[in-house]
Image (cartoon, rainbow, N blue to C red):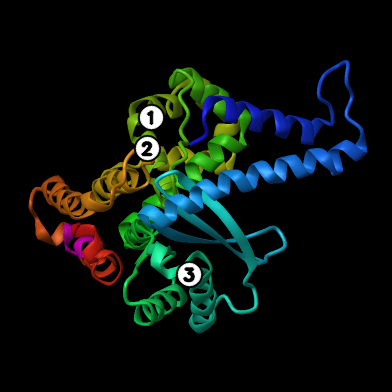
Amino acid sequence: MLKGHEEEQMKYGCLIMSNGWTDRKNRTSYHDLRVPLLKKELQYTKYMLKGHEEEQMKYGCLIMSNGWTDRKNRTLINFLVNCSLGTMFVKSIDASEFMKTGDKVYQFLNSFVEKIGEKNVIQVVTDNESNYVIAGKLLQTTRTKLFWTPCAAHCLDLMLQDIGKIPKVKKVIQRGIKLVGYIYNHSMTLNIIRKFTSKSELVKHGVTRFATTFLTLQRLHKQKVNLRRMFTSNEWLESRAAKDPKGKKATDIVLMPSFWNDVVYALKAMGPIVRVLRLVDNEKRPAMSYIYEAMDRAKKAIQKAFNGKEEKYKDIFAIIDRRWDCQLHHPLHAA
């Protein structure tokens, strides 16, 4: 963490670099920006990194790799190091040519551990794709004193994704997305709806794509009465949008009892998993030692939501157990 005066210096340095001035009286020249000021900022950055490196040597650290795809469709991997002082970005590589090869990913992870120092590394965290699983297991075989764990948030998101493939849930998600998409793409419809919902938004973004899907269904369910009132109101029925084929389809969805029954089913199935996802994505406190208990509570909550009728939740439990056993069931989570 930066101290108050250090944070101000950092902000001031960024301001100089982005705007090219110090104050109104003393303009900064191009030479000053690219030579003395740049050197000064580089020294300051190295000073901050040195503090992190010293902390890593004292108490250890964990390495995080984060894969993503840019606008040029390149697969990039960011490497970050986390210690008690916070998270530090170290490097980024273009992995487009070998991303699907577990052996290659392992080579880069292994070389990065070597760079940081094996004795300083306690844990390596990666995504959950098969290539990372291969790389992680190879890394643990080579370096027996460190732990490899897949990202808990990614694993939970994959659980939600799999639950979203259950036919009943898949259908209601498709209808919900179609309904919300229609509403937000037609200003006339949106304006009418906002009169009935007190301008409440129907879309809420979550920490992952499937968490966002859940939150959107949750908001639709919360506004169920208002949506049904709106789509049966004279203002809607007399509008041009109500006579449009897409408007008629939206009306059918909102007035369809089976749609709302399936929304409730999806919320019961996904809600407890989303709560665990919020726990592990929380930056205020480490969630490592809470995951076992949180998952047990999630399963009990799902069981209770379906009144203990196993035929209604057995497919959901099978999905949870499959992902949990192969990805999240780890000694570190029992620490």
Point out which mark residue 85 bears: none
Label 3 residue SS = helix
Residue at 37% from the left image edge and 65% from the top image edge: 150
Mark sitting earlier along the chain (1/3): 3
The image quarter in which residue 324 lies: bottom left
Residue 289 in the figure: left or right of residue 33: left
Q: Which residue is mark 1?
A: 228
Disc 3 packing (10 Å; few <14; some 14–19; many ≥20): many
Q: Residue at x 49, y 20 (%)?
A: 199
> What are the residue bounds of the magenta stretch?
313-317
Between residue 43 and residue 172, name the one nearer to us.
Answer: 43
Name the residue that disc number 3 marks: 113
Residue 200 percent across, percent down from the top left: 45, 24
Please rate how many residues cluster around mark 2, counting C-alpha atoms within 10 Å: few if below 14, some from 14 to 19, many from 20: some
Q: Is residue 121 visible?
A: yes
Residue 254 counted in the magenta span: no
Q: Is residue 7 left or right of residue 150?
A: right
Gap in angstroms between the C-alphas marked 1 and 3: 57 Å
Q: CA distance from mark 1 to mark 2?
A: 6 Å
The earlier-in-sequence mark between 2 and 3 is: 3
Quarter of the image containing the C terminus?
Answer: bottom left
Residue type at the position of mark 3: Val
Question: Principal SS element in the magenta part?
Answer: helix
Residue at image position (53%, 22%) is 192
- Determine the residue positioned at 12% across, 50% down: 300
Query: Residue 311 location in percent, x, y?
Result: 13, 61
Q: Are marks 1 and 2 in contact (CB under 8 Å)?
A: yes
Q: Are marks 1 and 3 in contact (CB under 8 Å)?
A: no
Residue marked by disc 2: 255
Instruction: Give 136 or 174, whichever is nearer the viewer.
Output: 136
